Image (cartoon, rainbow, N blue to C red):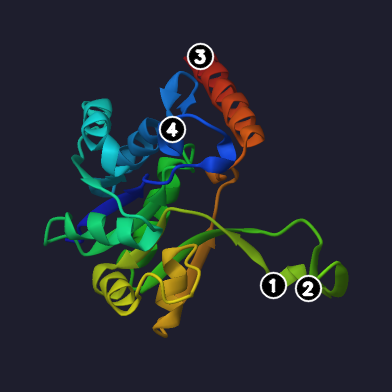
Amino acid sequence: MTSVGALVVAAGRGERLGPGDPKALRVLGGTPMLVHAVRALAAASRVEHVVVAAPPDAVTVTRQLLAGEHGGASLVVVAGGAERPDSVRAALAALPDDVDVVLVHDAARPLAPSDLADAVADAVAAGCDAVVPVLPVVDTVKQVSGDKVVATVDRSTLRAVQTPQGFRRGVLEQAHREHRTGDGVEVTDDAGLVERIGRPVTVVPGHEDAFKVTRPVDLLLAEALLADRGRRSRADG
């Protein structure tokens, strides 16, 4: 039986959101974004374990915040690192040894639905080394040099990547083992590290609700989406 664990990267400060709490602890609909993210992952039918990489100075607060918010999944909170790969490695080390499928999720995508986590986990369990949810790129994309456009990129082959991303545990461990923070390579997602070790990355359909909260306007959009979910839930009830 395949065992699935989810790592939540939540150690970022979120400067682009402006001054205040670390990004994952910013409030959305009266509840911190991290709580929304953990609730959704724990509600996924395949997720048995959740490990949160929290800001090092907020581990105790985060553990208290998430008490009772992780459904039937086990929960561990560890101190994240200075860079994203450091946080992922710290969380990965805290997973039980029997977990063989690992999801990596950004707390800054608090409204990603549980079904998306299950779809990614299913694809890995079916034999894929690495799986990422994607959406088509709808904007025209230009390649520039300085202040001049040098080319218009064919967007038909482009996809915007989301999380949670899924991996066979051994593949993710190898990718992080062979990566060294500070080697000059920008790491924006774990699938990029898997690509660097030559393993295939498979795509599955993403979800519009899994957008990343980066700027204040993203918080407004998330608040509106959350309010709409609440209205629809009350109407269905």
Q: CA distance from mark 2 to mark 3?
A: 43 Å
Residue 212 percent coordinates (x, y): 55, 45
The secondary structure type at the circle numbered 3 is helix
Task: Identify which residue is drawn at 55% across, 14% down.
Answer: 235
Q: Residue furthest left?
A: 97
Dot in front, 3 or 4: 4
Q: Crowdedness of circle 3 by 10 Å Cα count: few (<14), some, many (20+)?
A: few
Q: Is residue 115 left or right of residue 43?
A: right
Residue 211 percent coordinates (x, y): 57, 45
**Mark closest to the chain's N terminus, 3 or 4:** 4
In the image shown, does 178 or 111 lie closer to the viewer?
A: 178
The secondary structure type at the circle numbered 4 is helix
Q: Which residue is mark 4?
A: 33
Q: Crowdedness of circle 4 by 10 Å Cα count: few (<14), some, many (20+)?
A: many
Say which amino acid is labelled 2: Asp
Q: Which residue is mark 1?
A: 157
